[in-house]
Amino acid sequence: MALGAAAAAPGALWAAGTEVLVGDEKSNRAFGYKRSVSHWTVDDLEWEDLCGWLAREGVEAVDLVGPENWHHLKKHGLDSSMCNGAELNLVDGFIHEEFEGVLHERYRAMIPRVAKAGYSNLICFSGNRRGLSEALGLEQAVKALQPMVALAEEHGVVLQMELFNSLVDHPDYMADSSRWGIELARALNSPSFKLLYDIYHMQIMEGNLVANIKANHQWYGHYHVAGVPGRNEPWEAQEINYPAVMAAIESTGFEGYVALEYLFTEPKKESMARSFTEFIR
């Protein structure tokens, strides 16, 4: 089943179509945002198999791909919707001064590389609190990120800090609320810094997804998708009403990426196809 055809079928959530060139095919989609899948969730699929299938199905990109694998995407006309490889890990991030030097070294090298490859998004992380207050973490993050954001501006790259939940998956992570992330984004005040709003994580931490997205969408540059609880498919057997959340994202005029990032309980291609045609459409 071709995803582009399903998205444009009668009764689709939005009527106005947008023609998109994906690989060697054109698809008509009834929404403005683009779609992707996080590579770590499908890394058991061979690159050729995965990229060929995504291109045929009208999915534009693969998420969380570093330079060593960009050639696979380019072969099939796919985007690296969120680049990685500059971060140290998920817990040692920009809120701690002791990591500032090495993070600067790594991001100074990666930002121009992302731009040269024709990509625009590069992930970053706050890191864990380790007893640090939110105020001091915010102050250090602003100081450490400012020169990196300035460099990103020069190269047309956007640094995107992911929001995690600290209740289930990432204990002690600092950027565990939209409030703290927005404070950071306001302080940096740059189009080259956005928040990666992970819908799964934020449902666990604060809920109120639709109102939050509509009120604060200018700070959000990317979205991740998974069901709550369990981090599985975003279908009926979980608590998030994904068609309503996607409608909220669409209503903001968002033209960036929404990426599947869940733990599969069904065969992966069939699962992705259902997610994209029925829930992330």
Image (tube, helix red, strand yellow):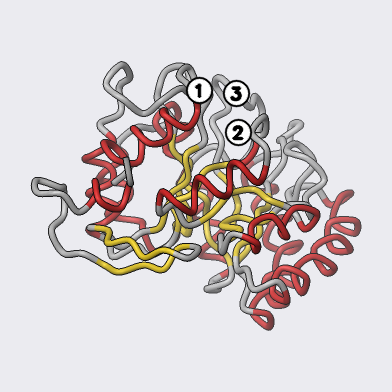
Q: Which residue is mark 2?
A: 42
| Labels 3, 2: front one | 2
Disc 1 is placed on an element classified as loop
* Amino acid type of the residue that numbered disc 3 sits on in the rendered structure: Asp
Q: CA distance from mark 1 to mark 3?
A: 17 Å
Residue 240 drawn above or below residue 33: above
Q: Which residue is mark 1?
A: 264
Q: CA distance from mark 3 to mark 2?
A: 19 Å
> Would you call the spot at circle 1 few (<14 residues within 10 Å), some (14-19), or many (20 or more)?
some
> Would you call the spot at circle 2 few (<14 residues within 10 Å), some (14-19), or many (20 or more)?
some
> Would you call the spot at circle 3 few (<14 residues within 10 Å), some (14-19), or many (20 or more)?
few
| Labels 1, 3: front one | 1
Q: Earlier in the sequence, mark 3 or mark 2?
A: 2
Viewer-proximal residue, 60 or 1? 1
Counting from the top left corner in percent of width and height, residue 268 is at 50, 28
Residue at coordinates 69% horizontally, 48% vertically from top-left? 136
128 vs 22, left or right, is: right
Counting from the top left corner in percent of width and height, residue 231 is at 48, 23
* Amino acid type of the residue that numbered disc 1 sits on in the rendered structure: Phe
* Disc 2 to disc 1: CB gap under 8 Å: yes
Residue at coordinates 67% horizontally, 71% vertically from top-left? 149
Residue at coordinates 47% horizontally, 45% vertically from top-left? 259
Q: Earlier in the sequence, mark 2 or mark 1?
A: 2
Q: Earlier in the sequence, mark 1 or mark 3?
A: 3
Residue at coordinates 27% horizontally, 58% vertically from top-left? 29
Counting from the top left corner in percent of width and height, residue 155 is at 68, 80
182 vs 111, left or right, is: left
The quarter holding residue 280 reads: top left
- On residue 169, the disc is 3
- On residue 83, the disc is none
* Amino acid type of the residue that numbered disc 2 sits on in the rendered structure: Val
